[in-house]
Amino acid sequence: MKVLVVGPGGREHAMITSLLRDPHVSEVHSAPGNAGIAQDVPVHPLNAQDPDAVVALARELNADLVVVGPEAPLVAGVADALTRAGIPVFGPSAQAARIEGSKAFAKEIMAAAGVPTARSVATDDLADVRAAFERFGAPYVVKDDGLAAGKGVVVTSDRDRAEAHARECLDAGGAVVVEEFLDGPEVSLFVLSDGENVVPLQPAQDFKRVRDGDQGPNTGGMGAYTPLEWLPEGFTD
């Protein structure tokens, strides 16, 4: 089986490393890849958020499967385009990926499904942001509604800093989600689903903020570890 892995990062490199060990996989390609990936498999220049370009490359390579790693191509509809072209793809549709592409939409889904979550306000109006600050108090949690590679969140007790971040997001034409602050350990849990069945992967915890004591700004994640020995039994049941 020939596999094309779409994406430029360490996540994609890890998937490629695993695929190369699979006896059912005869060939792996990457697009756009990176310098490290290029040492292991052929890489191809590509705008990963262009569905037509991804389909064209998959056809050129005669790929049996396309694996899409990053969120942005999925939100852009790459998986949908591949499906329409009759090319098997591992990755959710744009409609399903919206839960990652919009924090406001994710909040709506959680509310509809009865999933416990922090109280929040989604808005494109700075007056609403200020009202939410008054309602929830400090520390202030301000999130860019759209994709921001893990860097669109500010958690701070400095109200001016929180408002400045909100203003930056709004001035860029987006919306923000203001949440009440919740204190505690963060756990990432990914699941595989065919639309009906769900299989959980192993929970992990990553490190978001720069500098010791979580005193710095948010990042896209600076490493993760698993298993989490402190998690209660049956966490994924």
Image (cartoon, rainbow, N blue to C red):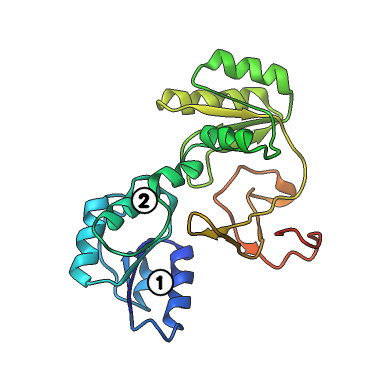
Identify the residue under disc 2. 73
Q: Residue furthest top?
A: 127
Give the x, y percent position of residue 65. Answer: 33, 69
Circle on res. 36: 1
Residue 214 visible from this viewpoint: yes
Left or right: 141 in relation to 9: right
Residue at image point 22% right, 52% down:
52
Indicate the amino acid at tag 2. Pro
Q: Secondary structure at mark 1?
A: helix
Label 2 secondary element? helix
User: Image check: 192 left or right of 214?
Assistant: left
> Where 222 falls versus 119 (above or below)?
below
Give the crowd class for mark 1: few <14, some 14-19, many >=20 residues within 10 Å: few
User: Residue 6 appears in which quarter of the rendering?
Assistant: bottom left
From the viewer's perspective, is the residue at label 2 or at label 1 nearer?
A: 2
Inspect the image, locate mark 1, and give the three-letter code of the amino acid beneath it.
Gly
User: In the rendered structure, which disc, 2 or 1, sits on the residue that comes first in sequence?
Assistant: 1
Please tell me which residue is depicted at 50% across the width and 42% down the height of the picture. Answer: 99
In this rendering, does residue 165 appear at all? Answer: no
Numbered label tally? 2
